[in-house]
């Protein structure tokens, strides 16, 4: 009986990390700040999840780590700038509907652009380095540099301002806690995408094949599925997601620079490591953890803020060396 | 994934085997009888000379250029570039120990570079003067690097390549953040400025007359110090990779399962080479601090520096040691002078805004990046490796 | 259309290397339609490699593999599977994070389960029905093995490649497995079965091929081998006949 309880504890413990942190933070900062920061953390987590989920699926399915993933984030952000330019009538209008519509157009455009680039990228670059981790790392880092420089060539070296739409600039109040309106939108979008992903993964055949493929690629092929074709689709989806993440993040920062993808990259890696390489669920929880940690620590101990996520990662690795929800049997 | 449940070794795909063809093979077809005559020379290069006539010539030419640098390329800027190249040769060669010879991709190399630099910088900035402080600082930097590298190695080298790389990225990032935030120790983002030992100062003039038209002063001495130390460290690394220890490393890179099966503790070997590599990087960092009289997070810890190292080793040639020399020379020169070339091209083309943006001097990194990708794709052995292998 | 007794699968002088290691040195064997061909041999003889080569998971360096007259050399594994060949590896290949139902679903086409097909499989392996919605990783070793085989046969297959299914199973489960395999035999399914358990081999094998060091050292009738103890000793060693 004892071992059964221990096993249960082992299995459910990783799920407890987030609630614990959230609850522990409450007494440290008071209710008002806590509500604001928790929403901020969840929102940041959602945006990070958009970017990280694609990467973890790609890695889980084909063991390809695309260091150039950051470039797709950057492209998404810049495409947003270009798309929202002509739509300035919609973004400056005092109509929530028009504002949201503009953002939706930008979101879809960013996804399409990054997805298209992803298709080309997979063909030209990734195909050459399946199964060769050293070359993968090298070639994708090189590609990252090249794409970011090309972005500068097309859009110029200066950072570009991306003001928020008119109705999304202020804050709403939950009790006495201020919550930026845009954050609520981002939170909603993030959750919607996460829900859609979850549905596709669990309710569709293709999702089933992907989930199986992440566990055992060979066996899925032995069951008759051309996993390579599935992978191209997943790669494009992953880069499209990164583009969406870039769009939301760029709009959130109100400033788009060529470094925007890089700044997210290290956090995305931390999320992947914390969550477990290849696990979308782990990625979701990891992203929330990172978002919350960043915001909580920023408030409680600003000097530690930048390094806090790395410390979090180190602590989790000491406890679970393969991440919280690793794929594959122990 | 499959590999965890059962130990069926993977049938290597064609890509994987072509992936990183090193230029070093167990038989050395290029070794001619010539070198056996001058045996002391072959001892110095540990029986691992560049090989081909053309390559020997290139390396000797570069060597000569460095020996006579202050006279061939007078001026403070040129001397600075030469020093920088020497330091980078060590930084990149030590990275090759891990990447080219053992097959480890680490992003923490710049961290050790920085630790070595800060070791010297912190002591000298605190007011300690003289060579004692310099040596102590360098030793401290090297020591910390050794311990840190060993710790990272033991904890994470069991992990898959990619996982390990990501962790080193996080660790390096943390080090950078630490250096930027810990103002009291590292001077924060501004870094530390300090006074180097007297004989390295511009005011130090041991000879009253110029030699061959060049005034011998502190910076010239600093340059030669850098050059000599770099040369010695390089030859030391050459000896290491050509020793039995080095052979095991190469075997690990080829097929670690087999090496493990033969009874070697792969993790131990990897940890040792990581520690060694880190110490070399730290020493390079100490030299850097000495030459600049300054150190800051951007000088030694930035990710763009890590990218530079990768550029140099890949373009130069992984797994050859000499590739580090070729790569360092090419990339550093490109950094300084490619901008001029691009500027010239820009003026010549005078084309559309897109073209002029493409060839803008600030876009040198774009072209180096393209070269990098092309080389990884078509010439994985890099320039030196490719030259060594062709008929 | 292959008739019973016709050769369905033929390997001719197949050589397979893994990296620098040469594993198969000219393997030639046949599997006849509707019959169970046993593939026996000591550990490391190359039996698993043979199955993997047929399945396209490893590419042969030389030799020919034909399935129903069609050459399948160099074909991609999914294409080989779509020809009607199912593979149950030694490690079972169960997707632990998916439910039993989802594991089974992967073996069917877009139309889902054919009721009769599913029913017969559930009859052979009751535990599968019990754990239908549980994560496959929570099953015991024996139950996983059953799931692996159930998944391989829930749809009609023309050839079944099974690698050591009775390994580590309790005697009761071994019996259930043998029942199922006999049931499949009744359905005229062609099976190429790697097995260490000689008694099981005798119970269901029609033909036999014995491997040693990457070569076929004996092929012929299973029953005949069963009667010839001296030959058994020579080919398989004492441990084989004793262990069961």
Image (spheres, coloured by chain):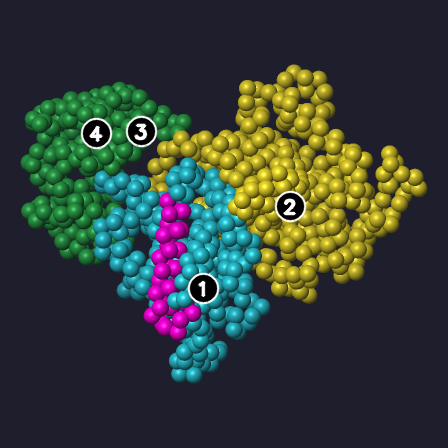
Chain colours: A cyan, B yellow, C green
Residue drawn at 54 percent across, 62 percent down: A307
Q: Name the mark nearer the viewer: 4 or 3.
A: 3
The residue carrying pointer 3 sits among few (fewer than 14), some (14 to 19) or many (20 or more) residues within 10 Å by Cα, namely many
Label 4, on which residue?
Answer: C39
Circle 1/circle 2 CB separation < 8 Å: no
Residue drawn at 68 percent across, 65 percent down: B184
Distance, label 3 to label 1, CA atoms, is: 51 Å
Q: Name the mark nearer the viewer: 3 or 1.
A: 1
Residue B376 in the image: x percent, y percent?
Answer: 50, 36
* SS for dot 1: helix
Residues at marks 4 and 3 on the same chain: yes
Distance, label 4 to label 1, CA atoms, is: 64 Å
Q: Nearer the viewer, residue B391 or B354?
A: B354
* Figure check: B153 above or below C66: below
Q: Nearer the viewer, residue B41 or B221?
A: B221
Magenta span has A100?
Answer: yes
Q: Numbered disc 3: what chain?
A: C
Q: Nearer the viewer, residue B285 or A88?
A: A88
Highlighted range, magenta: A91-119
């Amino acid at each position: 009986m004892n071992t059964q309880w221990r096993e249960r504890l082992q299995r459910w413990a990783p799920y407890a990390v987030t609630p614990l942190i959230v609850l522990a933070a409450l007494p440290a900062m008071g209710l008002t700040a806590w509500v604001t920061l928790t929403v901020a953390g969840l929102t940041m987590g959602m945006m990070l999840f958009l970017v990280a989920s694609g990467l973890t699926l790609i890695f889980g399915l084909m063991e390809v780590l695309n260091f150039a993933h950051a470039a797709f984030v950057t492209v998404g952000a810049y495409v947003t700038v270009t798309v929202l330019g002509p739509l300035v009538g919609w973004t400056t209008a005092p109509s929530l509907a028009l504002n949201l519509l503009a953002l939706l157009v930008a979101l879809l455009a960013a996804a399409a652009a990054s997805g298209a680039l992803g298709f080309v990228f997979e063909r030209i670059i990734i195909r050459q380095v399946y199964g060769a981790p050293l070359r993968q790392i090298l070639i994708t880092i090189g590609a990252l540099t090249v794409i970011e420089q090309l972005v500068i060539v097309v859009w110029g070296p200066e950072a570009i301002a991306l003001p928020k739409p008119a109705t999304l600039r202020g804050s709403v109040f939950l009790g006495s806690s201020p919550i930026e309106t845009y954050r609520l939108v981002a939170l909603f979008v993030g959750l919607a995408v996460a829900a859609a992903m979850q549905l596709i993964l669990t309710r569709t055949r293709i999702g089933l094949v992907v989930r199986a493929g992440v566990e055992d690629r060979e066996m899925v092929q032995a069951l008759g599925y051309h996993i390579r074709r599935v992978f191209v689709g997943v790669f494009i989806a992953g880069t499209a997601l990164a583009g969406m993440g870039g769009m939301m993040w760029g709009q959130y920062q109100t400033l788009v620079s060529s470094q925007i993808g890089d700044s997210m990259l290290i956090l995305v890696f931390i999320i992947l490591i914390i969550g477990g390489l290849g696990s979308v669920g782990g990625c979701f929880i990891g992203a929330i953890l990172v978002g919350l940690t960043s915001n909580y620590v920023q408030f409680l101990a600003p000097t530690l803020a930048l390094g806090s996520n790395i410390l979090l990662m180190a602590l989790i690795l000491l406890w679970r060396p393969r991440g919280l929800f690793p794929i594959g049997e122990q | 994934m499959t590999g965890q449940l059962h130990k069926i070794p993977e049938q290597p795909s064609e890509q994987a085997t072509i992936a990183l063809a090193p230029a070093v093979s167990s038989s050395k077809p290029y070794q001619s009888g010539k070198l056996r005559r001058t045996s002391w020379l072959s001892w110095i290069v540990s029986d691992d000379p560049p090989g081909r006539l053309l390559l020997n010539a290139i390396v000797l030419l570069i060597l000569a250029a460095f020996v006579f640098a202050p006279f061939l390329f007078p001026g403070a800027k040129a001397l600075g570039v030469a020093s920088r190249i020497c330091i980078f040769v060590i930084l990149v060669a030590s990275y090759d120990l891990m990447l080219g010879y053992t097959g480890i991709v680490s992003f923490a190399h710049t961290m050790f570079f920085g630790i070595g630099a800060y070791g010297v910088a912190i002591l000298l900035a605190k007011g300690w003067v003289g060579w004692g402080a310099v040596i102590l600082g360098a030793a401290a930097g090297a020591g910390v690097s050794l311990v840190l590298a060993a710790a990272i190695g033991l904890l994470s080298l069991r992990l898959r390549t990619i996982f390990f790389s990501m962790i080193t990225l996080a660790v390096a990032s943390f080090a950078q953040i630490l250096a930027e935030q810990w103002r009291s120790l590292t001077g924060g983002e501004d870094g530390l400025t300090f006074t180097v030992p007297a004989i390295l100062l511009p005011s130090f003039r041991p000879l009253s007359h110029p030699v061959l038209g060049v005034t011998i002063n502190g910076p010239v001495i600093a340059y030669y110090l850098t050059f000599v130390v770099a040369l010695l460290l390089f030859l030391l690394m050459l000896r290491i990779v050509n020793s039995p220890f080095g052979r095991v490393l190469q075997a690990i890179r080829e097929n670690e399962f087999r090496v493990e099966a033969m009874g070697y503790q792969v993790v131990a070997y990897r940890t040792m080479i990581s520690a060694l590599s880190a110490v070399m990087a730290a020493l390079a960092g100490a030299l850097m601090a000495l030459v600049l009289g300054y150190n800051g997070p951007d000088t030694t810890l930035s990710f763009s520096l890590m990218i530079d190292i990768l550029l140099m080793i890949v373009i130069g040639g992984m797994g050859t040691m000499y590739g580090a020399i070729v790569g360092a020379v090419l990339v550093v020169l490109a950094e300084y002078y490619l901008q001029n070339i691009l500027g010239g091209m820009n003026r010549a083309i005078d084309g559309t805004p897109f073209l002029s943006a493409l060839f803008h001097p600030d876009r040198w990194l774009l072209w180096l990046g393209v070269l990098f990708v092309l080389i990884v794709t078509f010439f994985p052995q890099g320039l030196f490796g490719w030259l060594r292998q062709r008929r | 259309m292959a008739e019973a007794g016709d050769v369905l699968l033929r390997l001719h002088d197949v050589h397979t290397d893994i990296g620098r290691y040469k594993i198969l040195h000219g393997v030639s064997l046949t599997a006849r339609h509707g019959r169970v061909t046993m593939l026996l041999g000591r550990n490391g003889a190359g039996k698993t490699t043979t199955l993997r080569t047929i399945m396209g998971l490893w590419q042969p360096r030389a030799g020919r593999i034909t399935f129903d007259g069609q050459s399948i050399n160099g074909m991609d594994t999914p294409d080989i599977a779509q020809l009607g060949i199912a593979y149950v590896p030694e490690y079972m290949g169960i997707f632990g994070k998916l439910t039993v139902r989802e594991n089974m679903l992967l073996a069917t086409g877009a139309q889902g389960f054919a009721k009769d097909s599913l029913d017969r499989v559930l009859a052979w392996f009751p535990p599968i029905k019990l754990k239908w919605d549980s994560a496959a990783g929570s099953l015991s070793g024996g139950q996983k093995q059953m799931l692996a085989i159930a998944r391989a046969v829930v749809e009609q297959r023309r050839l079944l490649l099974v690698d050591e299914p009775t390994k580590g199973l309790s005697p009761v489960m071994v019996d259930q497995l043998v029942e199922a395999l006999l049931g499949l035999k009744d359905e005229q399914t062609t099976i190429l079965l790697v097995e260490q358990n000689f008694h099981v081999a005798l119970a269901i094998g029609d033909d036999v091929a014995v491997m040693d060091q990457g070569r076929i050292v004996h092929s012929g009738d299973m029953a005949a081998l069963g009667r010839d103890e001296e030959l058994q000793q020579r080919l398989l060693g004492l441990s084989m006949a004793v262990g069961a």
